[in-house]
Image (spheres, rainbow, N blue to C red):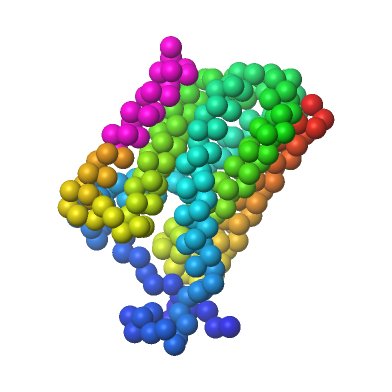
Amino acid sequence: MPTHPRPLSPHLSAYRFTLTMTMSVVHRATGMALYAATVLLALWFIAGAFGDGALDVVHLIYGSWIGQIILFLATWSLFQHLVGGIAHLFWDFGSGFSREGRFGWSGATFIAGIVLTLLAWAVFVWF
Amino acid sequence: MSDISQKTIATPTTHYGAAKASTWGFIIQRVTGALNVVFTVFFIYLVVRLARAGSDTMSDILGNPLVLIVTAVMIISVALHMRIGMRDVIEDYVHSEKLNRLCLLLNTLFTVIVALATLAALAKLAFWG
């Protein structure tokens, strides 16, 4: 079967930055970040399977300040991608495409992503 | 790389692109995405419960069949979702045909290895403490 090259996607430089466009880019970027972050989850369980010695190393690295910053950003990526994904599911059903709908959804996901991240860390880590 | 005209893309008779794989990806991406929304609630419970825990506690928690099965299905759902997501990005931005194929192959390898390694670790913790 002959294969054809895919249609080319315009790069970021072709667009004017708007809220909806920015949140679309953020959705992809957080998706890519989560793709990488699955390695952290895998390493945690693998260390657990090897025993407490390996687990201590993971606790040390993940508990360090740089580890905590990465986990915090991973948490934000997770929640941002989650609420962004819910907005996309609504859009898939053809609703929310008015000007208010588009900007409302995009703005709401950005705020919800930050609020959920801070809430999760406040409840489970900080306090 | 040959130039593709808009007409080639728009005309159904050229059978442009991978029809079956793309439709499958479109559906699976949305099904796993919706599933992963629900899995996130479980994931938060799991991470909070196992944070700073030793391997004994990990084995206890994952020894519960319900926790083990939900965790395993979650890993598979996430792996499917992220493979399709990365494939979309590769298709959009890696245009050279050889590099494109290589990236798609590495993407599949990465997701399969991450998923299998995690599932193996879960099985070890659950069944052999």
The residue that appears at 47% across and 69% down in the rendered structure is B96
Image quadrant in which the N terminus of chain A is located: bottom right
The vertical placement of A38 against B107, above or below, is above
Location of residue B120 by image quarter:
top right
Furthest-right residue in view? B128
Total marks drawn?
A: 0
The residue that appears at 31% across and 40% down in the rendered structure is A109
Q: Which residues are magenta?
A: A110-127
The residue that appears at 37% across and 24% down in the rendered structure is A118
Magenta highlight: main SS: helix
- Spot occupied by residue A18 in the image (x, y as percentages of width and height): 20, 50
Q: Is residue B8 visible?
A: no
- Spot occupied by residue A24 in the image (x, y as percentages of width and height): 32, 50
Furthest-left residue in view? A99
- Spot occupied by residue A56 in the image (x, y as percentages of width and height): 66, 19
Location of residue A107 by image quarter:
top left
User: Is residue A114 or residue B71 the one in the foreground?
Assistant: B71
User: Is residue B64 or residue A120 the one in the foreground?
Assistant: B64
The vertical placement of B58 against B41, above or below, is above
- Spot occupied by residue B72 in the image (x, y as percentages of width and height): 66, 41
Image quadrant in which the C terminus of chain A is located: top left
Is B54 displayed left or right of A81 in the figure?
right
- Residue A68 part of the magenta-drawn span: no
